[in-house]
Amino acid sequence: MTHTITHAAVTQPFSLGTDSESVKYGIPSLCGPIEYSIVEAHSFVSVTSTTSAGTISVQSSLLSNIGTYTATLEAKLTNYPEVAPAQVPFTI
């Protein structure tokens, strides 16, 4: 049996985070860039970000990926790895 999935990726935009020091002093990017990722190793989920917006994309051609999944969007300060990252759970 052959299955073809022809739908484009499902996407969800999100607002980029800010760090408290940049807000406090009014200097954008004072603490450097913020890196976004999905904590879980779901091969069908990706995160992209630009300087103005972020997007979570979900796409798969495997029937075995059908289902409901828990995922966690993580934001961490690239220049300060010792600072605990912010995490937001969501459902796919």
Image (cartoon, rainbow, N blue to C red):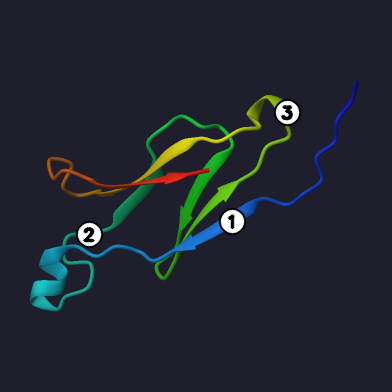
**Rendered residue at 44%/67% (across/down):** 53
Residue type at the position of mark 1: Thr
**Rendered residue at 39%/66% (across/down):** 15
Q: Residues within 10 Å of mark 2 (few under 14, many from 20)?
A: few
Numbered circle sitting on residue 32:
2
> Which residue is the site of mark 1?
11
The one of 39 and 35 positioned closer to us in this rendering: 39
Q: Nearer the viewer, mark 3 or mark 1?
A: 3
**Mark closer to the chain start, 3 or 1:** 1
Q: Quadrant of residue 6?
A: top right
**Mark closer to the chain start, 2 or 3:** 2
Q: Are the residues flagged by discs 3 and 1 in contact, CB closer than 8 Å?
A: no
Numbered circle sitting on residue 60:
none
Residue type at the position of mark 3: Leu
Q: Quadrant of residue 5?
A: top right
Vertical comparison of 7 with 45: above or below: below
